């Protein structure tokens, strides 16, 4: 890649000649109105996704995620949001062909701690030409397109890149505290999806223990019932196993309720 300044570039939409000022990254073609992003020596389409959520609605999406099955019980009530900010975060958007399939891939366009954001389902039909009015809230891309392409090809060896673009997506970044630890979650403003790499997750061990105890109890009862076949007391053993199953059921149910209410 050349380190010399880009003085003349061609619009990716109409081929018109563009003359960016030194250091200028975002351009609007005066001939066709397309918005483009200048990575040194290259020009790609520049899009953005409009936000459908305001701040309170984004907070509501975060609360619903906190009260869901992934997080510990009542995280929405036990945690405290200490910071919330809105920004347009840049993602490199690639349309690639791999074999007979065409798929899309997203790579980070700037540093971010929530790498899960690249799993966003980005509907191409909802993209719009980037509006310079968003500049004040937009994060400037810091990851060169060549780096993003390298990441892409490592994940998808042999893929053919059909289209590249820079997309700014609306995100609400939340920082919240739980038990004196600070966590970060991102709410995507277009779809309301929540992304978090590290969060207070439900502990699996109590559920596994409760499930293991229940399985062991009923396995023993099944063995008791079947042992009657060998010793000639099938009816007696089956009846005893059925009675014991009815006796144990409330205790096992209570144990499951207690685990679900505390974890």
Image (cartoon, rainbow, N blue to C red):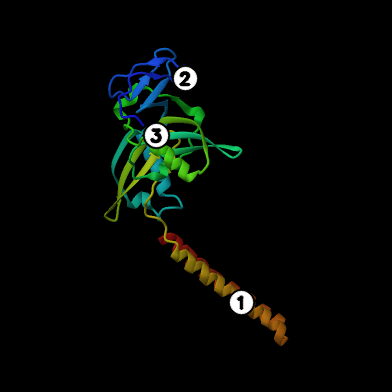
Determine which residue is flagged by label 1.
221
- Counting from the top left corner in percent of width and height, residue 53 is at 40, 33
Residue 44 position within the rendered picture, expressed as x and y whole percent measured from the top left: 42, 26
Of 130 and 153, the residue lying toward us:
153
The answer to whether 55 appears left or right of 220 in the picture is left
The residue positioned 53% from the left and 41% from the top of the image is 158
Give the mark nearer the N terminus: 3 vs 2. 2
Tag 2, which secondary structure?
loop
- Name the residue located 38 percent from the left edge and 38 percent from the top edge: 147
Looking at the picture, tell me which residue is in the foreground, 136 or 185: 136
Q: Residue 186 or 206: which is nearer the viewer?
A: 186
Q: Callout 2 environment at 10 Å: few (<14), some (14 to 19), or many (20+)?
A: some
- Judging by the rendered image, the residue that carries numbered circle 2 is 13
Q: Is residue 136 in view from this perspective?
A: yes
> How far apart in space, not on screen, are marks 1 and 2 (Cα)?
73 Å
Q: Give x and y (percent) for residue 232.
A: 73, 86
Q: Residues within 10 Å of mark 3 (few under 14, many from 20)?
A: many
Density class for disc 1 (Cα within 10 Å; few <14, some 14-19, many ≥20) is: many
Q: Residue furthest bottom?
A: 231
Q: Do the numbered discs 1 and 2 sit on residues whose CB atoms are within 8 Å?
A: no
Q: CA distance from mark 3 to mark 2?
A: 19 Å
**Marks 1 and 3, how far apart at CA:** 63 Å
The image shows residue 106 at horizontal and vertical percentages of: 45, 38
Q: Is disc 1 placed on a helix, strand or loop?
A: helix
- Residue ID for mark 3: 145
Q: Name which quarter of the figure residue 138 lies in.
A: top left
Work out whether residue 240 can be spotted: no
Q: Quadrant of residue 214?
A: bottom right
Q: Earlier in the sequence, mark 1 or mark 3?
A: 3
């Amino acid at each position: 890649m050349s380190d010399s300044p880009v003085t003349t570039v061609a619009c990716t939409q109409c081929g018109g000649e563009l003359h960016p000022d030194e250091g200028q990254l975002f351009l609007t073609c005066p001939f066709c109105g397309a918005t483009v992003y200048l990575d040194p020596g290259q020009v790609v389409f520049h899009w953005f996704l409009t936000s459908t959520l305001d701040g309170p609605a984004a907070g509501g999406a975060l609360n619903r995620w906190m009260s869901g099955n992934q997080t510990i019980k009542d995280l929405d009530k036990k945690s405290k949001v200490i910071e919330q900010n809105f920004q347009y975060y840049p993602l490199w958007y690639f349309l690639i062909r791999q074999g007979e399939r065409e798929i899309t891939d997203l790579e980070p366009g700037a540093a971010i701690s929530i790498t899960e954001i690249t799993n966003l389902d980005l509907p191409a039909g909802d993209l719009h030409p980037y509006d310079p009015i968003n500049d004040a809230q937009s994060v400037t891309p810091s990851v060169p397109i060549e780096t993003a392409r390298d990441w892409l090809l490592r994940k998808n060896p042999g893929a053919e890149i059909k289209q590249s673009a820079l997309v700014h997506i609306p995100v609400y970044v939340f920082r919240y505290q739980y038990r004196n630890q600070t966590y970060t979650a991102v709410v995507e403003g277009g779809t309301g999806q929540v992304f978090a790499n590290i969060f207070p997750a439900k502990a699996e061990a109590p559920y596994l223990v409760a499930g293991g105890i229940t399985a062991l109890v009923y396995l023993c009862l099944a063995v008791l019932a079947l042992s009657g076949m060998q010793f000639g007391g099938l009816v007696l053993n089956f009846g005893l196993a059925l009675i014991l199953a009815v006796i144990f059921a409330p205790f096992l149910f209570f144990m499951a309720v207690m685990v679900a209410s505390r974890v």
